[in-house]
Image: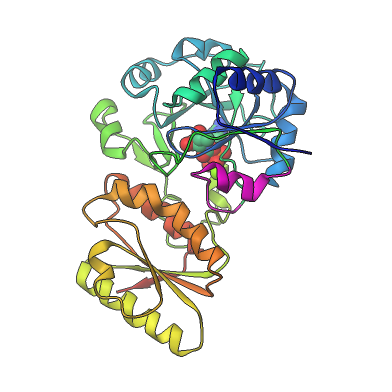
Amino acid sequence: MRTVVLKCPPDDLEKAAQVLREGGLVAFPTETVYGLGANALDEKAVAKIFHAKGRPPDNPLIVHLASAEDLPQVVASIPPEAIVLASRFWPGPLTLVLPRKDEVPLITTGGLETVAVRVPDHPLALELIRRSGVPVAGPSANLSGRPSPTTAAHVLEDLGDKVDVIIDGGPTGLGVESTVLDLTTSPPVLLRPGGVTWEALEEVLGKVILDPAILAKEPIEEGPVRSPGMKYRHYAPKAKVYLVEGQDEERIAARVDSLAAELAAAGLKVGVLATAEGAARCGRGLVLIGGSRRDPAALAASLFAHLRTFDRLDVDAVVVEGIKPVGLGLAVMNRLRKAAGYNIIEA
Ligand code: TXA
Ligand code: MG
């Protein structure tokens, strides 16, 4: 298949919308990461998403809408909390899990009776969905298990021969995926931390429970998994990742440096993902700087691109400086623990 990369004047968007209507695959930018879109109501089109990504069939997809007014197309009932959250955070990086309407095929929801929905905050995404006239199923546009794509080039790298169209909207702003919140239970459960923080949700809803899988230090084996996506190794570069954590920032930075030195002495090619403050201490390895410790937004925005860069540099090991899991830092640390495959070093 020849993939067409579109820079997107309105005619191009119309072409991409037509591809969606006809059951094809369109990768598109959102404010979080690039999505791999298909008509969420078309079983055959959705099957192409799972095939292209190599995604396990029990991992459900997020359905993207152009407006909260379209919720009744895919959701069987809308609780009052959903209306409050939609008016506060949509368009934006918040995904709500709600009761599924029968029209949404089970392949889209990974066999669940719930459906995850969001309205993305990106003009190209919104215009694409509007013009297609259908709800758009869209997981992150990476091969299953790889870091999510934050540029069109990342999508091309993973799925170049498997999508019909890639809409190039430049680098995405946020860099980590949307927050996933389950509203089918009381109190609501945060299934995946993301662009809308836990703190911001609790301000609106009162108590919000954090799913134990979010900051697990080892894989959770027992009991049913609330968010099927959380059980798979994810966001992982090819190198072995060592995530250094602790209470004291200076000790973390010092341990990152000594661990990088130990691995280099063992003959490994070492990459270091550090904060600007921590990088000042690093004497060893290829150091990529995510941003200041005080600026988790900068760390989030560059996280996945840096993990992909280490792949291109062909390093054997990546040593990562952990940050405080508060605000957007919770999403960053959740992705890092998964990228590390729970290989956590306490400083
Ligand atoms: O920011 C984002 O959310 C991006 C952009 C493209 O919108 N999309 C994204 O999709 O990250 P994906 O498929 O990579 O992640 C969707 C997550 C998975 O962890 C999945 O298990 C969870 O949402 N999910 C989807 N539907 C669900 C449902 N009905 N119940 C519980 N979890 C669900
Ligand atoms: Mg994903």
In the picture, measured across the screen, residue 287 lies left or right of residue 170, that is: left
Q: Quadrant of the C terminus?
A: bottom left
Q: Nearer the viewer, residue 220 or 253?
A: 253
The magenta-colored residue range is: 145-161
Picture quadrant of residue 136: top right
**Height in image: 34 above or below 128?**
below
Q: Nearer the viewer, residue 162 or 232?
A: 162
Q: Position of residue 113 (x, y in %)?
A: 61, 26
| Magenta span contains residue 158 | yes
| Magenta span contains residue 172 | no
Picture quadrant of residue 197: top left
Residue 340 visible in the displayed image? yes
Q: Position of residue 53 (x, y in %)?
A: 67, 44
In the picture, measured across the screen, residue 269 lies left or right of residue 212, that is: right
Residue drawn at (31%, 39%) of the image: 198
Picture quadrant of residue 38: top right
In the picture, measured across the screen, residue 266 lies left or right of residue 293, that is: right
Residue 143 visible in the displayed image? no
**Height in image: 193 above or below 90?**
below
Q: Position of residue 171 (x, y in %)?
A: 45, 41
**Height in image: 279 above or below 328?**
below
Q: Quadrant of the N terminus?
A: top right
Residue drawn at (50%, 24%) of the image: 124
Residue drawn at (76%, 38%) of the image: 2
